[in-house]
Amino acid sequence: MSEEISLVTGGNGHLGNNLVRTLLSKNHKVRTTVRNINNQGPFKGLNCEVVQADLTDKKSLKKAFQGVKNLYAVAANFSMWAKNPKTEIYDNNMQGTQNVFDIAKECGIKNIVYVSSVASLNFTKLPANVDNGYNKDRRNWYYNSKNDSDKLALELGKKYGIRTVLILPSAMIGAMAHNLSYSNNLVLQVLKGEIPVDTNVTLNWVDVKDVALGAYNAMKKGRDGARYILSNKSHTTLQESVRIAVNLYPELKLKIPKKVPKCLLYTVAGLMEFSSKLTGKEPQLQRHYLDMFYGLKQDYNISKSIEELDFKPKSSIKALEEALEYLKNDWDKGKLSE
């Protein structure tokens, strides 16, 4: 086992936990951070060090970063909605990025793989490509946070002399999910027949294990200052996603969602947003999300990742089939029959 410590922030999250497992399988000495030190379930049977740290608390980060050479900056606020999105999502993600690089510099960390998102890409020309610049749509605070924290990470890496490589995953799905991410939850909704209409929003499914291996290879081979898209090349429609579940599990008697006019979706989204203000729960549909993604084909140019990181993701269909099987049979038995 390598004596160099590789640290993964947010090791209890979907990507973070799969990355911890990937590093252990490669015989790396792994430390990982969680905000709640009592949250040990995701690490059962894993030979890794678990420490408490919060991205907003520099003192805790300094303690966690001691003796670390390679840092995988995974932890972030991945919420698409909040009561106060500017503060809860944007400010937290920007300050967290600043804190991570400040303390990394102080602790002598040499290499950082920073997890950004395809949300930071410019979608005005498809397939989306890192060479086309950043997302120019500023209507969503989560997307703004990924855009601006991506830029900040590159700026700070250059300023502090830390080799910084960025990875931009699409909709990560699949196994070892201790809490459901936004994408995995959407797959579960498909299984439970909770997709009543086709919103004409496409998905680019990618297996989280492929992204974890991509992050590992980014640390090994990625160029300083480079951004790598970790996704599949082509999108899958919502109707196609449900149809895959229909064919796999006819006993669930799932129905293919029908397309409805955008104006009707817009009205429904407005009602859901109003309801969310009363309940405090995230609306299933939001108007700015429709503005940004209605009819958009989420296709990506991943040639750089293939050539430089040897990125070979399983197909979107295969990733979705395996995620459906995992969520139906292994994740939490009994939920689908409730």
Image: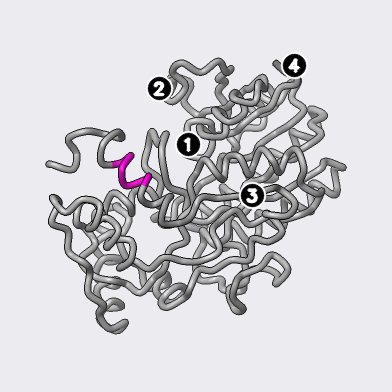
4 and 3 marks in contact (CB < 8 Å): no
In this view, the residue in front, 187 or 31, is 187
Instruction: For the residues labelled 1 and 3, say whether their Cβ atoms are less than 8 Å apart.
Output: no
Tell which of 235 and 296 is nearer to you.
235
Going from N to C along the chain, the mark reached first, 1 or 4, is: 4
Provide residue 11's location: percent of width, then percent of height: 53, 31
Q: CA distance from mark 2 to mark 1?
A: 11 Å
Structural distance between the alpha carbons of marks 4 and 3: 26 Å
Q: Could you classify mark 3 by the number of other residues whose Cα lies within 10 Å: few (under 14), some (14-19), or many (20 or more)?
A: many
Label 4, on which residue? 3
Residue beneath label 3, please? 311
Q: Residue at x 62, y 52 (%)?
A: 116
Instruction: In the rendered view, tell whether residue 100 sits above or below residue 197.
Output: above
Up the image or down, 115 lies above or below 32; here it is below
- Tell me: 260 left or right of 9: left
Q: Kindly identify which residue carries mark 1.
A: 13
Residue 88 seen in the figure: no
Point out which mark residue 41 bears.
2
Packing grade of label 1 (10 A; few <14, some 14-19, many >=20) is many
Please tell me whether the stretch drawn in magenta is mainly helix, strand or loop.
Answer: helix
